Image (cartoon, rainbow, N blue to C red):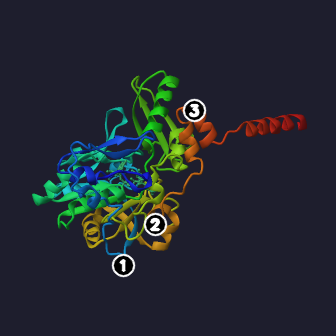
Amino acid sequence: MLKITDKSKCCGCNACGNICPKDAISMQYDNEGFLYPYVNENECIKCGLCLKICPIINEYKKDKNYKCDFIGGYNKDINILKNSSSGGIFWLLAENIIVKKGVVYGVELGDNFYVFHNRSETLNGTEKFMKSKYLESNIGLIYRKVKNDLDNKLYVLFSGTPCQIAGLYSYLGKEYATLYTCDVICHGVPSKVVFDKYIQELNISQKAKAVSICWRDKIKGWGPPNMVTVYFNNNEKLTTPSMKNPYQAGFLKNLYLRPSCYKCNWAKLPRIGDISLADFWDYEGKLSNDNKGLSIIILSSAKGVQLFNEIKKYIEYEFVTEQIITKKSRHVHLPPLNNKKRDLFFRNLNKYSFKRLSKKYIYNITLRKVLSAIKKNICKIIKK
Ligand SMILES: Cc1cc2nc3c(=O)[nH]c(=O)nc-3n(C[C@H](O)[C@H](O)[C@H](O)COP(=O)(O)OP(=O)(O)OC[C@H]3O[C@@H](n4cnc5c(N)ncnc54)[C@H](O)[C@@H]3O)c2cc1C
């Protein structure tokens, strides 16, 4: 029977819950705010399928010697580009599959900041999957729907984090000619408990209820700095550069990522997905679009190459080298670095306000630093 003793060895993909013939497994948040499978022992028949299906215990075999293609590119349609996180490539993949009367799976932001995987047969429906949601998405029982669609011979595009793609492959257990996968190059997923605490305090300080968030607002261009906008029920909004948004800053400093993310099995080449997408920061080539967004596109299978060839007429692109990509984008081939303050942060999470925690663990504003800043200012005044 499945029992998670080492949390770094569960990525939360819920392949176990999807395969369970008795529906004895449910995903529940732990005290750090990450989803883990819990087994109802009264229902469990000890068939062991959950252990066999786990993509961390039984790694999905991919051709390790596959030579990937590396591309920088962006969607020529300016409106789509504006509404996506980086180069608007996901939309083109989705459109390609919908035109073939297929279905697209992606991540949606629901009420109360609930982030989850959903299915869409229409292009309108896939709009909700656009833009990065920096929270762990709940997979639910979506792998069962994917299997059903594939068994019905539909084209399927499944997008998500690499571990979610690995979970899907593991659950399906065989190749399907009409399945295409797209993984986001992943920084790791941050804690829902921390996010909720941040939002609660924001509601108090803004005297309104936060109702939505755009983690990648292109209001001032694609960045850096990225802009984060929180929307409130009084029609006000709060836009800040990501490093000045304490929640986003803590995420970017790897302070509260899921334990398995620091040991990600899939931060490597070739990538697990047929096509992988990332932000192409510090690009130095010929492409230019006034800072509207540029993606890294990695093709890690013949299917990825096929899909790219079908959409490339809608993309401004150029091929680049593996060296350039691995230099510019750590998470293509390496997991996020540990943050030494993580344990201390979580130990203090219920003791202090998020504001206080962020000063201490995110911005490192210590009494000594405050005093030294005051001292510096006094010295300046005296000199004058
Ligand atoms: C949690 C997370 C971490 C990321 N970390 C990095 C990073 O370290 N470096 C980097 O270069 N890029 C990272 N990205 C990817 C980047 O932000 C863009 O999503 C990617 O470049 C695709 O952009 P786009 O403009 O083509 O598509 P968009 O329209 O922005 O497409 C969004 C895509 O992301 C998927 N998605 C959205 N939220 C989630 C989620 N919570 N979990 C799983 N899938 C999701 C959607 O299903 C869709 O496929 C991350 C994305 C996410 C969601």
Query: In terms of sequence position, does the residue under pointer 2 or pointer 1 come before the other?
Result: 1
Q: Residue at x 21, y 56 (%)?
A: 47
How far across and down, in percent of the image, does residue 53 sit? 27, 59
* Amino acid type, residue under disc 1 in the picture: Asn
- Mark seen at residue 65: 1
Kind of residue sitting beneath label 3: Lys
Mark 3 element type: helix
Q: Looking at this rendering, what residue extends furthest in the left direction? A: 152
Instruction: Identify the residue position indicated by label 2 in the image.
Output: 333
Report, in whole angstroms, how far the alpha carbon at label 2 lies from the one at label 3. 34 Å
Image mark count: 3
Per the image, the residue denoted by label 3 is 355
Residue drawn at 44 percent across, 39 percent down: 31
**Real-space Cα distance between discs 2 and 1?**
15 Å
Asked whether 82 or 68 is in front, the reply is 68
For marks 3 and 1, the one nearer the N-term is 1
Task: Identify which residue, 234 or 218, lies in the foreground.
Answer: 234
Dot 2, crowdedness within 10 Å: few (<14), some or many (≥20)? some
Q: Is mark 2 on a helix, strand or loop?
A: loop
Q: Taking the image as drawn, is residue 39 in sight? A: yes
Say which element carries label 1: loop
Under mark 2, the amino acid is His
Up/down of 200 relative to 139, above or below: above
